[in-house]
């Protein structure tokens, strides 16, 4: 198992930047795929960005070119650099760790961190 704790959420003006961090503990971090998801009020949770154990990245269409996901296996952290923030980026952001083993996918979630983009 892996435990995840997010940090870095805040209130920021449109056009601003924010960096979210997720600290992992409890298992071999490097073998997990990691991701950031977000959920706005009244909406479904959606993928923001993901990074595989090998470092390949994938982004949601709405954040491509603005957000960057990275990981540090030695520190067991995954980060999300968010630039050019828009009001529609307002949501609770969740860190995710996932691993497929014996045909079954295991997902782990953090408690979430609030990002609010408003003037």
Image (tube, rainbow, N blue to C red):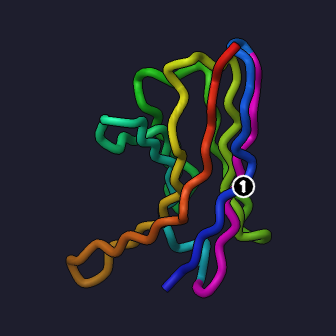
Quadrant position of residue 111: bottom right
Q: Please state the horizontal and vertical placement of residue 107, each as a whole percent of the image.
A: 37, 70
Quadrant of the drawing holding the C terminus: top right
Relative to 24, residue 13 above or below: above
Assess disc 1: are there few (<14), some (14-19) or many (≥20) residues with their C-alpha within 10 Å of its C-alpha.
some
Would residue 8 be found to the left or right of residue 41 on screen? right
Q: Please state the horizontal and vertical placement of residue 77, each as a whole percent of the image.
A: 71, 63
Relative to 87, residue 81 above or below: below
Q: Please state the horizontal and vertical placement of residue 15, each as a whole percent of the image.
A: 71, 12
Q: Residue at x 29, y 40 (%)?
A: 44
Quadrant position of residue 67: top right
Q: Is residue 24 magenta?
A: yes
In what element is the residue under mark 1?
strand
Instruction: Please provide the residue range marked out in magenta.
Output: 16-27
Closest to the observer, 117 or 65: 117
- Can you name the residue that lies furthest to the left here? 103
Relative to 23, residue 78 above or below: above
Where is mark 1, residue-wise?
Answer: 7
How many marks the image carries: the answer is 1
Q: Main secondary structure of the magenta part?
A: strand
Q: Is residue 58 magenta?
A: no
Q: Residue at x 46, y 42 (%)?
A: 38
Q: Residue at x 23, y 77 (%)?
A: 104
Would residue 115 be found to the left or right of residue 76 on screen? left
Q: Residue at x 42, y 31 (%)?
A: 60
């Amino acid at each position: 198992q892996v435990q995840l704790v997010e940090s870095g959420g805040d209130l920021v003006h449109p056009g601003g930047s924010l960096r979210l961090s997720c600290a992992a503990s409890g298992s071999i971090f490097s073998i997990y795929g990691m991701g950031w998801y977000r959920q706005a009020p009244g909406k479904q949770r959606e993928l923001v960005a993901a990074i595989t154990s090998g470092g390949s990245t994938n982004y949601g269409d709405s954040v491509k070119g603005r957000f960057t996901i990275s990981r540090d296996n030695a520190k067991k952290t995954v980060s999300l650099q968010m630039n050019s923030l828009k009001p529609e980026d307002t949501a609770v952001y969740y860190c995710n760790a996932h691993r497929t083993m014996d045909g079954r996918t295991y997902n782990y979630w953090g408690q979430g961190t609030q990002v609010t983009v408003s003037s």
